[in-house]
Amino acid sequence: MTYAIEAQGLVKRYGDTTALNGVDLAIQAGTVFGLLGPNGAGKTTAVRILGTLLRPDAGRAVVGGYDVVRQAHQVRQLIGLTGQYASVDEALTGLENLILIGRLLGMSRAGARARATELLRGFRLDDAAGKPAKAYSGGMRRRLDLAASLVGRPELLYLDEPTTGLDPRSRNEMWDIVRELVAGGVTVLLTTQYLEEADQLAGSLAVIDHGRVIADGSPAELKARTGAQILSVRPADPAGVPVALAVVAELTGGVPEAAGGTVTVPVSDPALMPAIVARLDLSGITVAELALRSASLDEVFLSLTGQRATPGALVPEKSAA
Amino acid sequence: MTAATFSPRVSPIAGLRHSMTLAWRTLVQIKHNPAELIDFSIQPIMFLVLFTYVFGGAISGNTGDYLTFALPGIIVQNALFATLNTGMGLSTDLQKGVFDRLRSLPIARFAPLAGRIVSDIVKQSWALALLLGLGVVLGFRIGTDVPSAISGYLLVLVCSLGFSWLAVLVGMLAANPEKVQIFGFVVMFPLTFTSNAFVPTATMPGWLQAWAKVNPVTILADAVRGLWVTGGGSGPALQSLLWAAALTAVFAPLAVRAFKRRT
């Protein structure tokens, strides 16, 4: 098996704060690897180390066969970096930004211009090519940022929270672009706070928290392990809650919780829904609301770490009533 | 994945090319934001005109004599203030993440810094030419020969390069560009005013005269006066170069170290 990226025991400290506390990663060439975690989990630190922007305090990482510390220059010839922190020059136009990168990568004037024009067209920025980047919308900026990291046709692309702060439409556009790149053979390392994004794009995942990888595997494996969907049942009469609890516990085999007249439980098999409806019906319980929704990242953490998520953090992402 | 075809390091020629490309990046911004050109042109023009016509008569008896005395000083003062642009530009790049992008590219590590310094020297020579040209329009005359005039011009550029290392260091240490500006106000203002750039030092208190005498601004202003107006000036010119060398020797390593640490 060839790995595009292999990291062992990465540690990075900032004073008393340990940003990374022994992270191991193995990312297969030609795939999308998702690094999933909340703010401050250490995702960006990991990307910066793999992108040669930071030296690890301990551990080692090899990208495309090159050591990120000792052979940083070779690593830089392989990678493209886009993210929260790698940015475009706001005072330059979109075209100039891309020409700048092309020239720095050793392209001729004409070659850099041709590559820039091609990318701007591909990212639907050709109309804005002559405008300074500071006049771009958030979605346009991210696209330009991504285009800038693609000028040199990198084999590996690091996307650090590429859709944070984007509206749903721009986010979907970004996802389509990433899918196209992967189809073209690029290996992608993606960090995200959104379970849905990782689910949409990544072939395998590592969940990172407090600088440690707390779970990894394919999205399906992770879901199976954590009960990635939440079933909620609200009887029309609150007096029916104890019966609903018993039914749900029996059929799902989980430990349901009751709060505010609603019974919730993590489930991994959506086919349970009709069975639960039937049993509640038999028990004479009228159901006012029945929903199956994706677990939020908080809920995944709850099952992974055993730590309680705050009730306010349970935000429904999609529901089927 | 192949691990064969990539060069292990940047050649010096390529590093020079990267620096020039990044210098272009800073200069081409003027095209989109002509206000920037006015920014670094209008302030020296105002200084020159105001000082000449408001203070000139009172200080030198007439504005013509004052212009002859003060133009070199104002040019020096402007050159030192302009070095702050280097620090502010670097600070902005750090803040906006442009440096992260540049550092993830296979380019010479020194290129972002060198590119900024080169572009700022180009801006410096523009401002210098502008001030000298305006001075001539107002009545300033070069009293020496062409080689001396050119030497004075180059001397100012070389010395501002020496001072720009201080600005680079501040730009790397400051949290944001505004802090660099505050530094400029707190350090550059007193430094340039406690010299003979604008006024003869004879009426200053003794302790201040003692400082003004060794102030590099005084020395450089005297060197330019010598090279442009009175003839001679090789003594102060040599001292100015020593100052520039000393500033470079002290601040360039510190600045480069801070640059490496921040980026």
Image (cartoon, coloured by chain):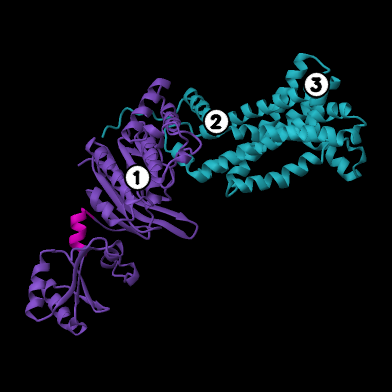
Chain colours: A purple, B cyan
Q: In the figure, residue A179 lies in which quadrant? A: top left
**Local SS, label 2:** helix
Is residue A77 shown above or below A289? above
Q: CA distance from mark 1 to mark 2?
A: 27 Å
Residue marked by disc 2: B115
Left or right, residue A271 beside residue A47: left
Classify 10 Å Cα crowding around label 3: few (below 14), some (14-19), many (20 and above).
many
Query: What residue do we see at 84% from left, 18% from top?
Result: B143
Quadrant, the N terminus of chain B = top left
View extreme (bottom): residue = A239
Mark 1 is surrounded, within 10 Å at the Cα level, by few (under 14), some (14 to 19) or many (20 or more) other residues, namely many
Are labels 2 and 3 on one chain? yes
Amino acid on which the number 2 mark rests in the picture: Gly
Q: Amino acid at mark 1?
A: Leu
Report if the CB atoms under discs 1 and 2 are less than 8 Å apart: no
| Residue B228 image label | 3
At numbered mark 3, what does the secondary structure look like: helix, strand or loop? helix
Check if residue A68 falls in the magenta segment.
no
N-term-proximal mark, 2 vs 3: 2
Chain ID of residue with mark 2:
B
Q: Chain of mark 1?
A: A
Q: Is residue A125 above or below residue A210?
A: above
User: Of the numbered discs in the image, which one, if any, rests on residue A159?
Assistant: 1
The dominant secondary structure in magenta is: helix
